[in-house]
Image: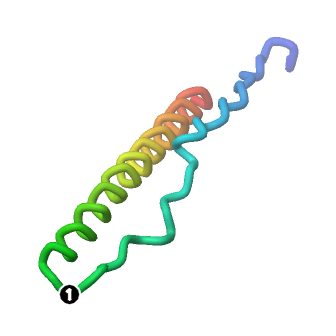
Amino acid sequence: MSGCSTTVLTRPSEPYQANLIAKCPESLPRLAGPTGSDFDLALRQFSNLYVVCAARHNQLVTEIQQRRDVTHEQRK
């Protein structure tokens, strides 16, 4: 009777894009002095790093969730 049943073969998932698995910088901007403009410069640099890293992280989470959803759909 087992000849009538079929096993669903799942394809191995494709590797993640290299830009999605890149780590965020570990060295963050430091204040160059005590002035408001020093603070502004460091804050702008930090903001630029955060935006790129957060976007990459969020896309990686989306990618992982989509792959999980596809895998669960294939098992049904």
Q: Quadrant of residue 6?
A: top right
Q: What colouring does the structure picture have?
A: rainbow
- 36 relative to 52 in the view: left or right: left
Q: Nearer the viewer, residue 25 or 40?
A: 40
Which residue sits at x=54%, y=41%? Answer: 19
- Image position of 17 with respect to 74: above or below: below
- 8 relative to 18 in the view: left or right: right
Figure label count: 1
- Image position of 52 with respect to 11: above or below: below
In what quadrant of the picture does the C terminus appear?
top right
Residue that sits furthest to the left in the current view:
36
Q: Nearer the viewer, residue 67 or 25?
A: 25
Which residue sits at x=23%, y=62%? Answer: 44
How many neighbours does mark 1 have within 10 angstroms: few (below 14), some (14-19), or many (20 or more)?
Answer: few
Disc 1 residue type (three-letter): Pro
Which residue sits at x=52%, y=43%? Answer: 20
Q: Which residue is mark 1?
A: 34
